[in-house]
Amino acid sequence: MRLNKYFLFFFLLLCFSNIKLLAQETAYSDLGAGEIKKDWLIENHHYTAQIITKDNQIILDNGLLRRSFLIRPNLACIDYTNLTNGQQLLRSIEPEASIVINKTNYAIGGLKGQKEKAYLNLNWEKNLHANENDFYFTNYTITNIDSFVNYNPQTWIPAAYNTSVKKFKGKQLVLHFASKLPALKGFIVNVHYNIYDGLPLLCKWVTIQNGADAVVVDRVVNEVLGLVEEESAVVGKPEEMKKQHGIYIETNYAFNNSMRYDISDHTTHWDIDSSYTSQVNYNYQTPCLLKVYPDKAPGIELAPNEKFTSVRTFELLMDSYDRTRRGLMIKKMYRTIAPWVTQNPIFMHLVSKNDAEVKAAIDQCVATGFEAVILSFGSHLNMEDSSAQNINRWKALADYAHQKNILLGGYSLFSSRTISPQDDVIDAKTGKPGGAFFGNAPCFGSNWGLGYRDKIVDFFKQTKFDIWENDGPYPGDVCASTTHPGHKGLDDSQWKQMNIQKGLYQSLNSMGVYINAPDWYFLDGTHKIAVGYREVNFSLSREQQIILNRQNIIDGTKEKTPSMGWGFVPLTKYQGGGPEAVLEPLQDHIKDYQQLMVQYFGAGVQACYRGPRLYDTEITRNMVRSTIDWYKKYRTILNADIISLRRADGRDWDGWMHVDPSGTDKAFIMLFNPTLAPMTKTLTIPLYYTGMKGTATFMDDLGATKKYTLGVDHNIQITVTIPASGYKWMVIR
């Protein structure tokens, strides 16, 4: 009898393990359909976007999400479901959007009559009615989607994201609305939705076609969602309560140099819903009404027949609290909607005093395998000098670089400086220059700002430069000037300046120019931002920098692809620090130099190697060349997304793993030993996101190969020895 009990126990345990394995392998089920689905992060080609019309409904569906609309008596969203986990996000009917025209608010679509706002019962449809003053639905159109940025990559990019092979796959739905009000005759509002193949993502924006009379657009709310609350609290303020975790919001209206989107965001608003009278919170303070609009963009004048386009809102439906998984989802979004960010050229940051030093740096790039020279701040480049002499000088150097298959780029500062009282941002409180994000700064809508834009475009057209490092880009300053030609006054100043900058970035993209910009403008055409670091830390010792850089890499790639961030290596003195902080003379610190190169390239993160040269001896050149050759050999997998294995703490091993389920190389592991003695460790390696099943073959940096059998949890255990103060790598196929 006792044996039978033990047998039953182990039988049940085995069954539970198999159920857990099944859940991990198949990942998700469309509740109600009974169809087992593949995990789209591993295999997503099964999920094709569709737009379906039936039974008084329009339905957006790609097998991963579903958003459904009633058409009559007015168009309204009645369903927003994450099909990967069955989560219904919607609890109430809200307008599709809203606009404030000449100080009057108008709803776009939507239905009235839902009395209970905690949930939406579709049997209540007969009780719903349209408001006669709201914009009403007229018709719809369906088209294929396309990129918002005309990108033309001239630098290295993974083959899958090259414009010659990359197609934006999905469907666009445009919902057309009009008004019955005489004051809005001829005024047309279009609500656009993009639904993409292969990921649970929608993009939504609003366009307005003005009628016969000039109007002032005071606000455009391009998304309104009555979402299920993340948590219920009897008491508590909105800022104290969690927001719905099942949806991630990002728009193309973010700034302020934070190196993270969530802190750069200026459009996402989690409001309360006082009409939701059955909520648990006594004061109706639950943050469950999502609205998307810019904080500081009122007072946009529209002339007769002029068109207005709102911000674009990307809505990624999340199926997990797990930070690694959520980060991989966001990175997959970037690779899909902004593939230009996957470009990742190998560049040095040259500090030059004359043209001969530029040519010498180009020659060193050829000798080592580097692909680009960027003239850093403090160099003798001035892109604002539009004289024929200056243009011809830099065109000749660009020609020299191109003859040797090297890209040439340069640095230009916009915002954190002052130009003149006539061109600087005007503080609304004082009526004088000041009050900007950087204290004093030029206005992009001033004569100087518009001239700066034109000079930059002209410089790249004439010189054929390849890379622009735009430091201090427009940081969202508002300007109270009423004489600047690029905006009317305070109200429209941010919106107009943002559009000036976006136009500049998009113009350069169409020319194939690669853009480094330390602010969050990825969705409008920039390619790279700082991975995330504190500049003064590069005045610390090389020993400290090595550890801190690995921490920065892990922290800065949780929601960014490796190609979206740059690091820093001070070959010469930067801001401060003594001889212990720099690598020059390079031959004397070749071990530290190689360590820094390996950990950056081993993460797929390009660093700014800032100084006058890449090598000083043949031994140094050979080290740099061999490191670059190693990186290029494994370049595709090293540019795949990173999973942290252990964050650096200077006391034990640390490392990360790249994963690419669609590649030949499924994973690449980098391990580091910060201690002064070799260390042997038995490590658990999670291989779920490689998509591998059954067995995995490891090859290490010494050429040794070994085959492992994956456990039921998709993990394996490996035993490795990491050299003292060194590293070890393995590729997995």
Image (cartoon, rainbow, N blue to C red):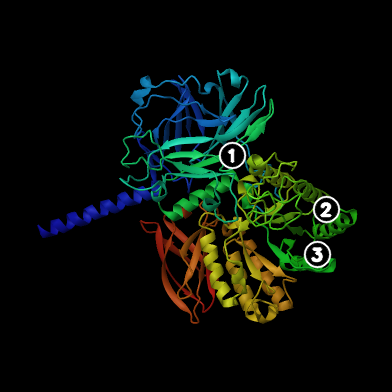
Marked residue nearer the N-terminal end (2 or 3): 3
Q: Where is residue 275 in the image (x, y as percent from the top left)?
A: 38, 33
Residue topped by disc 1: 311
How would you rate the neighbour count of disc 1 (Cα within 10 Å): few for under 14, some for 14-19, many for 20 or more? many
Q: Where is residue 233 in the image (x, y as percent from the top left)?
A: 32, 46
Residue found farthest to the right: 389
Calculate the distance from the C-alpha at mark 1 to the C-alpha at mark 3.
38 Å
Residue topped by disc 2: 463
Q: Is residue 631 above or below residue 68?
A: below
Q: Position of residue 48 (x, y in %)?
A: 51, 36
Q: Which of 682 and 60 is in front in this view?
A: 60
- Residue 204: image quadrant is top right
**Is residue 337 found left or right of 164 in the rendered image?**
left
Q: Which amino acid does label 1 sit on?
A: Val
Circle 1 SS class:
loop
Residue topped by disc 3: 380
The answer to whether marks 2 and 1 mark residues whose Cβ atoms lie closer than 8 Å is no
Q: Is residue 187 above or below residue 393?
A: above
